[in-house]
Amino acid sequence: MSMEFDSFVLTAAVADLTEEPAAREHADAVEFRMDLADEPLSALEAYDGELPILATNRPAWEGGEWDGDDADRLEALVEATGIDAVDAIDVELESCRSGDADGVLETARERDVAVVASAHDFEATPDEIEMIETLTDACEYADVGKLAVTAETRADTLAVLAVTHLLSSDGETVATMAMGEAGSHTRAVAPVYGSKIGYAPVDPAEATAPGQYDLETLSRLVSELE
Ligand SMILES: O=C1C[C@@](O)(C(=O)O)C[C@@H](O)[C@@H]1O
């Protein structure tokens, strides 16, 4: 089944699927960071949790921990789409643009698995035009276009929110967040402007990106701001 993003989806970002029961109370889905797990495909096969899974296999060149062959990385994602609980996958926009992800995108479509095309900037917040272009491009490849940038100032966070508002009011399905301390509040506020996915660790010590709130906190903030 394909994950739906017509309303906000709060994911518990985990490296270990045995954390899922602890996420159930607050999360709508689990983001399984395959690149952070020891035996990701075996873990997926053994999964018998309740929450649907968004599978991510982030390479080192996009801030993740997969540093092996890129074709093997994408092949692992293809295998993940064959697992019932996997209702969505995350594919890097860069892999979509190069054509490397063509097979993954096609298999996901055939298997009715939703796709999130993602882009990250771990250094800065690009200008608004560039963010709009990146997200628009990502939305062409996938069901959701996702952009995570690094904010240093309030102007950066405002730019991310403005772009989120612009694209979502134009009917695009986007997920946005500003990483880093200055960007934390965007994780709670971006959904108000139309961002459709949030990421939070169950245990704050296990954050998968800088500036994340823990799951319980993000769930509370998002529901209070709605
Ligand atoms: O790409 C994203 C967004 C993220 O980087 C964040 O900033 O919350 C966290 C990652 O786990 C996820 O894959």
Image (cartoon, rainbow, N blue to C red):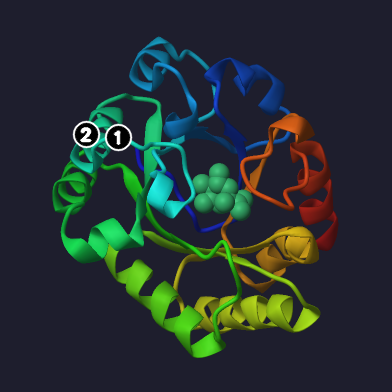
The image quadrant of residue 157 is bottom right
Q: Locate residue 64 relative to residue 148 in the image: left or right.
A: left
Q: Position of residue 87 (x, y in %)?
A: 39, 37
- For the C terminus, give its image quadrant: bottom right
Observer-nearest of 115 and 154: 154
- Residue at numbered disc 1: 68
Q: Residues within 10 Å of mark 1 (few under 14, many from 20)?
A: few
Q: Locate residue 30 relative to residue 1 in the image: left or right.
A: right
Q: Judging from the image, what secondary structure is the residue with disc 2 in?
A: helix
Whether 117 is drawn above or below 203: the answer is below
Residue 178: give its label.
none
Q: Locate residue 166 relative to residue 220 in the image: left or right.
A: left
In the displayed orientation, state which residue is furthest to the bottom.
Answer: 129
**Residue under the image location 21 percent in, 50 percent down:** 105
**Residue under the image location 42 percent in, 15 percent down:** 43
Q: Locate residue 25 relative to residue 7 in the image: left or right.
A: right
The image quadrant of residue 22 is top right
- For the N terminus, give its image quadrant: top left
**Residue under the image location 46 percent in, 84 percent down:** 130
Are discs 1 and 2 less than 8 Å apart at CB?
A: yes
How many callouts does the rendering have? Answer: 2
Q: Amino acid at mark 2?
A: Asp
Callout 2: CB less than 8 Å from ligand 1: no
Q: Residues within 10 Å of mark 2 (few under 14, many from 20)?
A: few
Does residue 188 appear in this view?
A: no
Q: Judging from the image, what secondary structure is the residue with disc 1 in?
A: loop
Give the spatial CA distance, label 1 vs label 2: 7 Å
Callout 1: CB less than 8 Å from ligand 1: no
Does residue 56 appear in this view?
A: yes
Q: Position of residue 31 (x, y in %)?
A: 52, 37
- Residue at numbered disc 2: 72
